[in-house]
Image: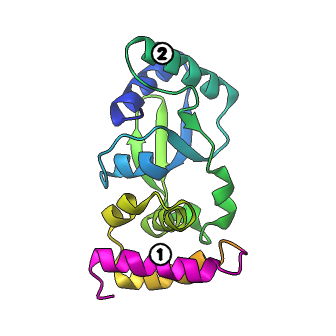
Amino acid sequence: MWTREILVSFDRYVSERGLHFEAVVIGGAALNLLGVVSRMTKDCDILYPEIPKEIAEASRAFAIEARAQGETLQDDWLNNGPASLRSQLLPQWEERLQTVFSGNAIHLRCLGRDDLLCTKLFALCDRGIDLGDCIALAPNADELDELLPWLERQDAHPGWPAHVRATLADLRRRLGHGV
């Protein structure tokens, strides 16, 4: 499982090999690095750029060494799984990035609040498993209203907008926004 301590160790590992990596991290890893949540996550999702071959190879080798020391780190713990989200984010998302980790060899930034909230709300509507993260982000009623049109456009299924509204209504209720 991925933790900040794993990232610190990987930074040392990468630095010792003369490598350098700058990227945009999202998902649970970003929330952990921001201090929004403190939970284990299975991976570190990189939105951008495509992970260079030498970093991907180093992350797999690091995972093998970590498992030999009792960690449960998967080979693909560092991945570009969510890279397709880049084309769906709010305009100018790159201008709202914030640094969340700066080591000797690794520099990670994450999305700004609205953009990160979009990704987590979309995941909640799409997969139904990100409720805890959405509650931890504690969007206010105005933020949910502002992001609703973006969320409704994320799937072409005719029932998607109604599903999104129902999901957000449930979230509003759980957050105590008077629904």
| Relative depth, front residue between 18 and 138 | 138
Find disc 2 in the rendering and name its residue. Answer: 16
Residue type marked 2 = Glu
Question: Would residue 53 appear left or right of 151 to someone viewing this image?
Answer: right
Q: What is the crowding at mark 2: few (fewer than 14 residues within 10 Å), some, or many (at least 20)?
A: few
Residue 167 bears which disc, if any? Answer: 1
Contact between marks 2 and 1 (CB within 8 A): the answer is: no
Q: Position of residue 4 (x, y in %)?
A: 35, 36
Residue type marked 1 = Thr
Q: Residue at 55% across / 29% down in the picture?
A: 20
**From the viewer's perspective, is residue 12 above or below residue 131?**
above
Regarding mark 2 in the picture, which secondary structure is present there?
Answer: helix
**From the viewer's perspective, is residue 160 above or below residue 93?**
below
Quarter placement of the C terminus: bottom left
Q: Position of residue 165 (x, y in %)?
A: 51, 82
First in sequence: mark 2 vs mark 1: 2
Q: Per the image, is 172 magenta? A: yes
Q: Position of residue 59 (x, y in %)?
A: 55, 25
Regarding mark 1 in the picture, which secondary structure is present there?
Answer: helix
Number of callouts: 2
Q: Quadrant of residue 21?
A: top right
Span highlighted in magenta in the image: 156-179
Q: Residue at 41% across / 39% down in the picture?
A: 102
| Relative depth, front residue between 60 and 39 | 39
